[in-house]
Image (cartoon, grey):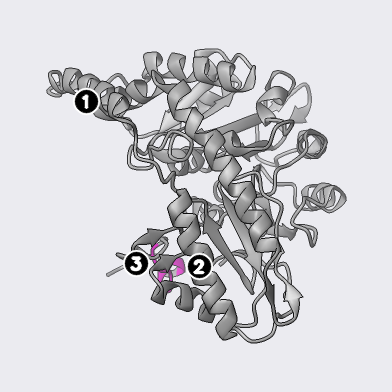
Amino acid sequence: MPLRPELADEAPYGAPQLDVPVLLNVNENPYAPPADVVATIAREVAAAAGGLNRYPDRDFPALRADLADYLAAESGVRVAPEGVWAANGSNEVMLHLLQAFGGPGRTAVSFAPTYSMYPEYARDTHTRWVTARRADDFTLDVGRAVATIEAEQPSVVLLASPNNPTGTALPAAAVEAVLDAAARVQVPDAPEAGGRRAGAVVVVDEAYAEFRRPGTPSALELLADHPNLAVTRTMSKAFAAAGLRLGYLAADPRLVDALRVVRLPYHLSAVTQAAARGALAHRDALLAQVAELRAQRDELVAWLRGRRHGGRELRVADTDANFALFGTFADRHAVWQGLLERGVLIRETGPAGWLRVSVGTPAENAAFRTALTEVLAEDVAGDTAHVTNEQEG
């Protein structure tokens, strides 16, 4: 096959999909949609099915209005429907952003460890990819971030808050510092206005935003003053709708218009639009599950911090997401394998020596605790190792 040379040694992205009793590896919401939510979605999809001989609305204004209403209720920030965009998962939203604002001769910057798909979006759009390190506690080193932006002059800056795989949320001051630095960038081949070229686009990926702890801000609060800011969200996590594949963003309508240029025709099916609107009609009930998952997460983090291995307490990153990153292990694969042999699948990802576990139901969390206790008692991973803060693999 005449494959592009840079793809020759690449493997498809994806976490292991194994048939085991306890699946805690891909940050899914463990609760299936309630029966009344399923009934509403089925009714909306049935209505849409009657018109499947026609193409769907390319710009889906009704769904965008529903998403804008949801964001106003969830965050207190009112975004015009014209400032909302949606696609097949936040992955496609991100790809639209890199297609519109990245490309040959341009650079995207992020801060590792972070979501392992980001460099793939850059690769697929021929965008140069640069990462700088986060601090040892996985927070954003603002000085290093600003210096990196000034040195690299990117057209896109990608931030995740809460960050995957660490769960770290960004304070508003850190996001504002990045926005200020990005505004000073002059993208070399960008249009000029008033004798100055356009600055970089800053994308804040808030896929796990609904799980953030009280008092943790959303970057949505900064939209009004920053036209080059895009805040992405998803229905996969909080809405228990990973199978729906609906991601979206909020931004200045001018930024959204740029994404309309690169989207594929009719990219969002009538069935997807109908199902998403059906789920959004039950947002209060679905978000009630989020509060329970936050409580389960905090209990799990506290329990993990009480475990010892190799004579030391386990490290657990502070998390505002529905997962926890914990370690460190000299042989993390052995720990992962030991859990798998006991019917519990978690994720071997993040910096060397660390593992990530999603928050499940109380029964699933209990099964994980039992399995990890047994694995640590067998000392399969040896002594705890000092590891460096590296890019997620």
Earlier-in-chain disc, 3 versus 2: 3
Tag 1: residue type? Ala
Earlier-in-chain disc, 3 versus 1: 3
Marks 1 and 2: which is nearer the front? Answer: 2
Segment tinted magenta in the rendering: 6-12
Determine the residue positioned at 69% across, 85% down: 383
**Residue 42, which numbered label?**
1
**Residue 66 place in picture, x, y as percent:** 44, 16
Decide if residue 65 is in sight here: yes
Residue that carries the numbered disc 2 in the rendered image: 370
Tell me if label 3 and label 1 are in contact, CB under 8 Å. Answer: no
Q: Residue 256 colored magenta?
A: no
Determine the residue positioned at 69% across, 37% down: 200
Taking depth in this image into account, of 25 and 186 the one nearest to the observer is: 25
Secondary structure, mark 3, is loop
Q: CA distance from mark 1 to mark 2?
A: 38 Å
Determine the residue positioned at 52% across, 24% down: 256
State left or right for residue 371 relative to residue 191: left
**Residue 236 place in picture, x, y as percent:** 43, 39
Secondary structure, mark 1, is helix
Residue that carries the numbered disc 3 in the rendered image: 3
Tell me if label 1 and label 2 are in contact, CB under 8 Å. Answer: no
How packed is label 2: few (under 14 Cα within 10 Å), some, or many (20 or more)?
some
Tag 2: residue type? Thr
**Residue 3 place in picture, x, y as percent:** 34, 66
Marks 3 and 2: which is nearer the front? Answer: 2
Give the quarter of the figure containing the N terminus: bottom left
Determine the residue positioned at 68% across, 37% down: 213
